[in-house]
Image (cartoon, rainbow, N blue to C red):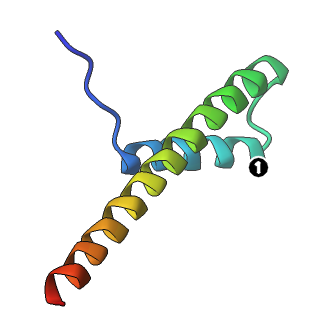
């Protein structure tokens, strides 16, 4: 069975959970390191999603402008 693709919303929820644990002092040093690595992965994933969506929107807007000329 193929792994389910992570969504932007799911990644943000995971990131928010990690931030809350860090801010709440709920993690020992081992957990902190693991959670920070996961947070870095999630941040990169979300940034990539946002950049891709931004590029797609800009392309659609440009296509619309070119179609109206």
Q: At 63% across and 40% down in the image, what residue appears?
A: 18
Instruction: Give the position of the C terminus as an image quadrant.
Output: bottom left
**In the depicted structure, whether residue 47 falls above or below residue 26:** below
Residue closer to the observer: 11 or 32: 11
Q: Quadrant of residue 6?
A: top left
Q: Is residue 57 left or right of residue 36?
A: left
Above or below, comparing residue 65 to residue 39 in the picture: below
Rendered location of residue 2, percent (x, y): 20, 14
Q: Nearer the viewer, residue 39 or 17?
A: 39
Q: Position of residue 34 (x, y in %)?
A: 70, 21
x and y percent of residue 49 in the render? 43, 49
Residue carrying label 1:
23
Query: Does dot 1 land on a helix, a strand or a loop?
Result: helix
* Camera-side residue of 64 and 12: 64
Q: Is residue 33 above or below residue 36?
A: above
> Which residue is drawn at the image coordinates 68% and 41% (left, top)?
21
- How many callouts does the rendering have? 1
Residue lying farthest bottom?
69
Mark 1: give few (<14), some (14-19) or many (20+) Cα within 10 Å: few
On-image quarter of the N terminus: top left
Horizontal placement of 57 versus 21: left or right? left
Residue 19 in the image: state x and y as whole percent. 67, 47
């Amino acid at each position: 069975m193929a792994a389910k693709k992570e969504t932007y919303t799911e990644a943000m929820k995971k990131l928010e959970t990690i931030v809350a644990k860090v801010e709440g002092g709920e993690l020992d040093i081992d957990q902190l390191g693991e959670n920070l690595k996961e947070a870095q992965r999630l941040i990169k994933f979300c940034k990539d999603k946002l950049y891709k969506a931004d590029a797609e929107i800009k392309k659609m807007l440009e296509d619309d402008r070119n179609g109206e000329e």
